[in-house]
Image (spheres, rainbow, N blue to C red):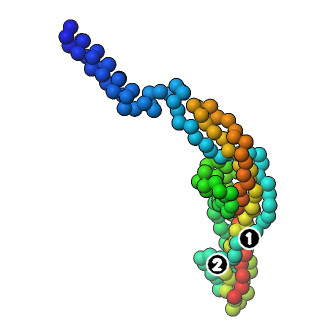
Amino acid sequence: MKRKLYSYVTALLLTVTALLFYPSQSQALSGNEASYFYWMQSGTPSYQSTSYGSWTSQKGTIVGPGTMKKSYTTKSSFSITGSAGIPVKTVELGLEAGFTKENTLSTSVSRRIPKGKTGVFQTRYQYKTYKVKMAQWVSIDGRKSKTGKTKYVTVKKRTDVQGRIILK
């Protein structure tokens, strides 16, 4: 009997200790959750412009005569170029998955290289710039709602890769 009572008292003490020392884990949705603000994409991004990176030589050249065939594959990416005072990581987390989805970009080119010439394969990236509306949200005791504040951020997205073969 004493052993059973001792087990109950021990279990009770462990439970009380857990409630006292780890309240955030024991008071789920009790009205004591932390409040915090965050930013989320609001609406569809607005296209602004297209730009191109510089041509970059890739590995592998061929001395003519002959035909040079090359292909190149990379991944799409994006960068925040204007965050309107919102931390960049916060903007990245708030963008919709469809907008930030990683895609495979590829190019293939072929060119005849004349005798005495060298073919050099080059690539460059195409970027599209978007203006994205971000809305501020607040979470209080597990309930989320908009605060009414909005800001616009600028996102530069790698959308294509182009290839060419030049003669030297």
Tally of marks: 2
Check the image and report above or below for 126 versus 14: below
Which amino acid, mark 2?
Answer: Ser
Check the image and report above or below for 167 versus 42: below
The residue positioned 59% from the left and 76% from the top of the image is 59
Comparing 2 with 75, the one in front is 2
Question: In the figure, residue 79 lies in which quadrant?
Answer: bottom right
Q: Residue 18: horizontal and vertical position, in percent?
A: 36, 28
Q: Residue 70 shows which numbered tag?
A: none
Query: Mark 2 falls on what kind of element?
Result: strand
Which amino acid, mark 1?
Answer: Tyr
Q: Residue placed farthest to the bottom in the image?
A: 116
Comparing 112 with 133, the one in front is 133
* Mark 2 surroundings: few (<14), some (14-19) or many (≥20) residues within 10 A: some
Question: Which quarter of the figure is the C terminus placed in?
Answer: bottom right
List the residue tagged with mark 2.
Answer: 57
Which of disc 2 and disc 1 is earlier in sequence? 1
Q: Residue 78: horizontal and vertical position, in percent?
A: 66, 59
Q: Horizontal placement of 17 versus 30: left or right? A: left
Question: Which quarter of the figure is the N terminus placed in?
Answer: top left
The residue positioned 58% from the left and 31% from the top of the image is 142
Comparing 115 with 21, the one in front is 21
List the residue tagged with mark 1.
Answer: 52
| Residue 96 in view (yes/no) | no
Check the image and report above or below for 50 versus 56: above
Q: Residue 43: horizontal and vertical position, in percent?
A: 77, 46
| Residue 5 in view (yes/no) | yes
Q: Residue placed farthest to the left in the image?
A: 2
